[in-house]
Amino acid sequence: MHTERPTTPPFGWAADFTTVGTTGTNGKTSTTFLLAHAMRGTGASALAITTLGYFIDDELQSDLARSLAGFHEAFRRAHARGVRHAAVECTSKALAEGYAKRWRFDTGVFTNLSPDHLATHGSWEHYLAAKAQLFVHLGPGRTAVLNAADPHALLLDRAIPTDVQRLWFCAPGRGPRLHDAELEAESVAIDVDGTRMRLRPSPVAERLGTELRVRMVGEVFGENALAAAAGALATGIPGDAVARGLAACPPVPGRFEVVHRDPIVAIDYAHSPDALARTCDTARTLAHGRVIVVFGAGGESTPEKRRPMGLEVGARADLAVVTNDNPRREDPQAIAAAIADGVREGGRADLRTLLDRAAAIELALAEAKAGDVVVVAGKGHENGQIIGGETLPFCDADVVRRALGGA
């Protein structure tokens, strides 16, 4: 099947950029920030475009709207400052609307895939097809970075044009390796200060050194760092600069963001079964006592994932506090009931249901003792809660800090 691929950039100066796009269900934002810092490991500047906003190095371009015009203006500003490298988070919605046809991507990175946003795309097949757009529109000689432990990467591999290079990465926590990988972690170790990966010997690994370190906490961030490293190497960034940049990248707001240390309290954006499972596993690794998880599910979005979300937490946590996320115009009680069914099916966690999210967080913190880990999941960096048709001010991290006396 012939696929039209973009050849002419939308603006003359756009041809100067080397752009890496990242897509997948989970890990897009973290991988994009890690990529931007890997690009900056040479001492040069980089543009990062994520769901958190547009960043030229560490400077948020807060006046730019999340729109095609905002996207172009972010690139124009960056170009005027001498920036020539960009890391872009690509959502399935944007890709379905033709994003990859309107901008030339030099490298595409695939993190993983699990059911999400099905209300937007109508079916699982359409969701996967949307993600694939980033890769089928890569030009000849460009590079697709693929997760060798995710079965959906094998499907993408079959759809990507044969004249696009492949670079495979793999981390042990995702599952068995399904394809040979040029960049693979032999082991991943985490503590409250970050994540360390020992690399399996290979020509690609030799360029990076024997280890990679990141300040983000969780095995999944080790996997994201491998993806980012592969993406940066594919653009020609030297390996020592990539490793240096990854190590310098600060934790991303709301991505297992540790806001208190004893008990450990982390704010996390996990809102799918797969992401919650990995977040709970990270919490278990850090815990000397119990794992307590506060979470809900968004309304008007993928109701079929609610019971599996509850199941993953119910099988891994010691206490699950089910609460509101962004219920929108759905009945919050009905959303919580579906999650609670899954928690009970999980068979391990004690269950509490408290729809007032602030009260639910306070309950979890009151239950926590030294050595415990509390995860407040689902909303991450968000500063609002959508109830009915209204967005009310709400920030999980602020609630935690107030409850702990500003600690």
Image (cartoon, helix red, strand yellow):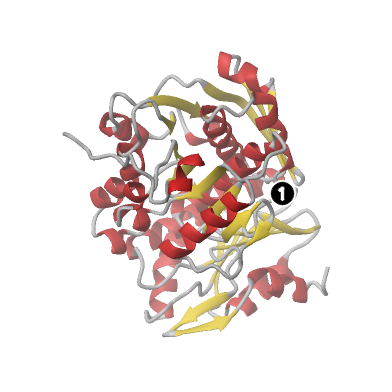
Instruction: Give how far across and how far down residue 306 sits, in percent.
Output: 40, 62
Instruction: Give how far across and how far down residue 7 sits, in percent.
Output: 33, 39
The single residue placed furthest to the left in the displayed view is: 1
User: Is 22 placed above or below 255 here?
Assistant: above
Q: Is residue 38 left or right of residue 144?
A: right
The single residue placed furthest to the front in the displayed view is: 12
> Residue visible at 77% across and 45% down?
193
> Residue visible at 46% across and 61% down?
344
Residue annotated with mark 1: 250
Residue 113, image quadrant: top left
Quick one: 132 or 9, which is closer to the camera? 9
User: Is 351 placed above or below 47 here?
Assistant: below
User: Is 254 placed above or below 202 here?
Assistant: below
Instruction: Give how far across and how far down residue 313 sits, in percent.
Output: 52, 56
> Residue visible at 44% across and 76% down?
327
Considering the image in quadrants, where does the C terminus appear?
A: bottom right
Residue 165, image quadrant: top left
Element on which disc 1 rests: loop
Label 1 packing within 10 angstroms: few (<14), some (14-19), many (20+): some
> Is residue 151 shown to the viewer in this render?
yes
Residue 218, image quadrant: top right
Q: Is residue 97 left or right of residue 189?
A: left
Residue kind at label 1, given as amino acid type: Pro
Considering the image in quadrants, where does the N terminus appear?
A: top left
Quick one: 392 or 400, which is closer to the camera? 392
> Is residue 116 shown to the viewer in this render?
no
